[in-house]
Image (cartoon, helix red, strand yellow):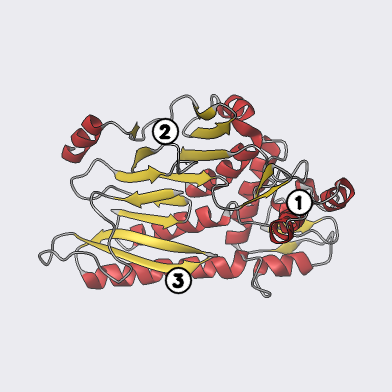
């Protein structure tokens, strides 16, 4: 989990933060429930009226994306795509196109470690967590027959998507919140508010830092509440950060722990306890990468991410002999303020 803020405590869930003289930048905080999580906007504006107007526009944009990409809303654009005849292209909105295009690119790059057709397997493991009954191999194999990112085809020369196989069901939960956070931050910028941050659960998109500050201070929770020393803080500005892990959503059966994160290649919930933090330029990128790198694991993930510019990752794993931390080269990322648990660095950053 990510704990986001500037310096000092976050503002309340009301409309505004502490006041300041009219005309000077004031801090405001807003929160609404969308896409199954709380979206929190923290911003600095010259007046309450400007902050209120910009935040309303940002939440409207998030709601618009939710209405298009949700797998819960029966009339969402995503559900309409699933109901469209297999093999026939459907022209879609720019939102759905961009998210599916980005997801497909990552699926190809990771050999299917990220796969938006994984929804049947995800639903199977939701049922496992409810019933505490482990599925059989044949049951998992049947589900896997409906999971294959290669059955989603993007049109050439137009925003169309074709589901090549009947019964494909898509899950954009591992990428859509990051995209919505990016879009909300863009709305705030176009409204003249550049010192802002959008937090959507484990995904954060940050703009310019608070006035006179080094950056937005993002706290990364420990994988295990009883394990001190693995917590960290990342200073973020004009970048994004996402986390993925199984600290809350998991099930233990027969002495084994199964995560809510499902490997699309095998159909099984991950057994290795892993928390992944990804830092990069956009939240649509860090959101999906956090899931993909959880599936790949730190050994293969470190190899995969090596040499990729502008993005980096941190893994924390629970091993038999305790907690282990892994960092890719350049973590948190080139051009992004560094990770810190050092009081001296924090004090220096406060003065920056």
Tag of residue 54: none
In the rendered view, would you say 114 is above or below 189?
Answer: above
Decide if residue 298 is on the left or right side of residue 343: right
Tag of residue 332: 2
Give how far apart the Cα atoms at labels 2 and 3 are.
31 Å
- Tag 1 residue: 153
Of residue 326 and residue 130, the one placed in the foreground of this image is 130
Give how far apart the Cα atoms at labels 2 and 1 are.
34 Å
Give x and y (percent) for residue 314: 49, 33
For numbered disc 2, what is the local secondary structure? Answer: loop
Nearer the camera: disc 2 or disc 1? 2
Camera sees residue 91: yes
The quadrant of the image that shows the C terminus is top left
- Tag 3 residue: 60
Of residue 331 and residue 12, the one placed in the foreground of this image is 12
Nearer the camera: disc 2 or disc 3? 2
């Amino acid at each position: 989990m990510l704990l986001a803020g500037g310096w000092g405590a976050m503002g309340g869930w009301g409309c505004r933060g502490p006041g300041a003289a009219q005309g000077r930048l004031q801090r405001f905080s807003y929160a609404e429930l969308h896409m199954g999580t709380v979206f929190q906007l923290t911003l600095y504006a010259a007046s309450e009226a400007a902050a209120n107007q910009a935040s309303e526009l940002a939440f409207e944009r998030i709601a618009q994306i939710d209405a298009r990409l949700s797998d819960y809303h029966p009339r969402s654009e995503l559900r309409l795509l699933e109901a469209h005849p297999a093999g026939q292209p459907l022209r879609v909105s720019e939102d759905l196109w961009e998210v599916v295009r980005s997801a497909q690119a990552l699926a190809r790059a990771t050999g299917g470690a990220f796969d938006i057709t994984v929804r049947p397997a995800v639903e199977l493991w939701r049922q496992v967590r409810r019933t505490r009954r482990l599925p059989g191999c044949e049951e998992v194999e049947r589900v896997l027959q409906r999971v294959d990112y290669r059955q989603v085809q993007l049109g050439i020369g137009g925003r169309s998507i074709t589901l090549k196989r009947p019964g494909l069901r898509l899950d954009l939960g591992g990428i859509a919140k990051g995209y919505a956070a990016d879009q909300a931050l863009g709305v705030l910028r176009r409204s003249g508010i550049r010192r802002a941050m959008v937090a959507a659960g484990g995904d954060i998109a940050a703009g310019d830092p608070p006035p006179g500050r080094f950056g937005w201070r993002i706290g990364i929770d420990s994988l295990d509440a009883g394990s001190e020393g693995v917590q960290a803080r990342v200073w973020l500005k004009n970048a994004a950060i996402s986390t993925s892990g199984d600290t809350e959503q998991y099930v233990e059966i027969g002495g084994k722990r199964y995560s809510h994160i499902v490997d699309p290649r095998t159909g099984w919930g991950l057994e290795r306890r892993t928390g992944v933090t990804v830092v990069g330029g956009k939240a649509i990128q860090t959101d999906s990468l956090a899931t993909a790198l959880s599936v790949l694991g730190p050994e293969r993930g470190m190899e995969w991410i090596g040499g990729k510019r502008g993005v980096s990752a941190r893994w924390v794993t629970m091993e038999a002999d305790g907690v282990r931390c892994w960092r890719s080269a350049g973590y948190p990322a080139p051009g992004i303020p560094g990770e810190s648990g050092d009081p001296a660095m924090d004090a220096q950053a406060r003065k920056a």
